[in-house]
Amino acid sequence: KQEVTQIPAALSVPEGENLVLNCSFTDSAIYNLQWFRQDPGKGLTSLLLIQSSQREQTSGRLNASLDKSSGRSTLYIAASQPGDSATYLCAVQLSDQNFVFGPGTRLSVLP
Amino acid sequence: EAQVTQNPRYLITVTGKKLTVTCSQNMNHEYMSWYRQDPGLGLRQIYYSMNVEVTDKGDVPEGYKVSRKEKRNFPLILESPSPNQTSLYFCASGRRTMNTEAFFGQGTRLTVV
């Protein structure tokens, strides 16, 4: 059964730092991996989707990489800002939009 | 604006009183799904639907029902809610093809007392 873990569970950094969030999954048979952002009281917002054939995706200050064979993905956030404070979830798509989510990393960026 | 809309956003109810959480999407997506989110357990899939009149169980379907009579709507029904169904619920939709984004609603916080 596919399991997804995320490290660290929580992270607090000063504004301006570059940071890396980690996601690991146990079964490499995935269609894609998506990173989401969750703000308190709000839904999930898709940040980046990496297809299984891709190695990385970039959007603004965000860069996500995927190493399917080793079951790992990282989300890199450059020059962090207080507005980046949120919970970041990674999810692997197994089939037909069936996702398995990690527990999330709670990020606080201090001004 | 493309969106997934859930109602209500917050609900407090008593054990055993039937309730329905509605979910509607305006993107003509074939796929819709319900998740619950609990501390330490992450999001877990309850039910999903690949198209109208087609529904399947996810990882935690016990105590829930769904229906998909129209493409845009996918209500979640709790026939006899219990306190262990207190949770944050999310509805999601997407196109059926692989490698496309999933869109999530804003969540429904349900408390069963």
Image (cartoon, rainbow, N blue to C red):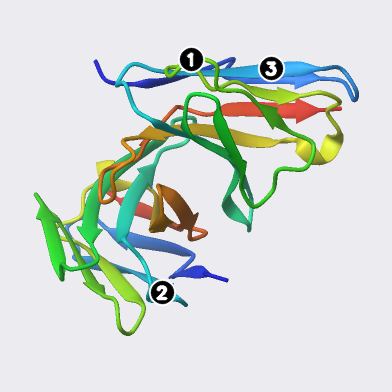
Image quadrant in which you'd find residue A18: bottom left
Q: Quadrant of the N terminus of chain A?
A: bottom right
Question: Which residue ends up furthest to the bottom in the rendered image?
Answer: A70
Residue at the spot of label 2: A24
> Mark 2 — on which chain does it sit?
A
Where's residue B111, x and y in %?
75, 28
Image quadrant in which you'd find residue A25: bottom left
Q: Amino acid at mark 3?
A: Thr
Where's residue B35, x and y in %?
57, 40
**Which numbered dot is residue B20?**
3
Image quadrant in which you'd find residue B8: top right
Task: Relative to A65, say whether A81 is above or below.
Answer: above
Task: Relative to B37, say whether B22 is above or below.
Answer: above
Residue at the spot of label 1: B70
Disc 1/disc 2 C-alpha distance (Å): 37 Å
Which of disc 1 and disc 3 is earlier in sequence? 3
Q: Does B37 sit left or right of B28 as displayed? A: right
Task: Relative to B19, say whether A7 is above or below.
Answer: below
Determine the secondary structure under disc 3.
strand
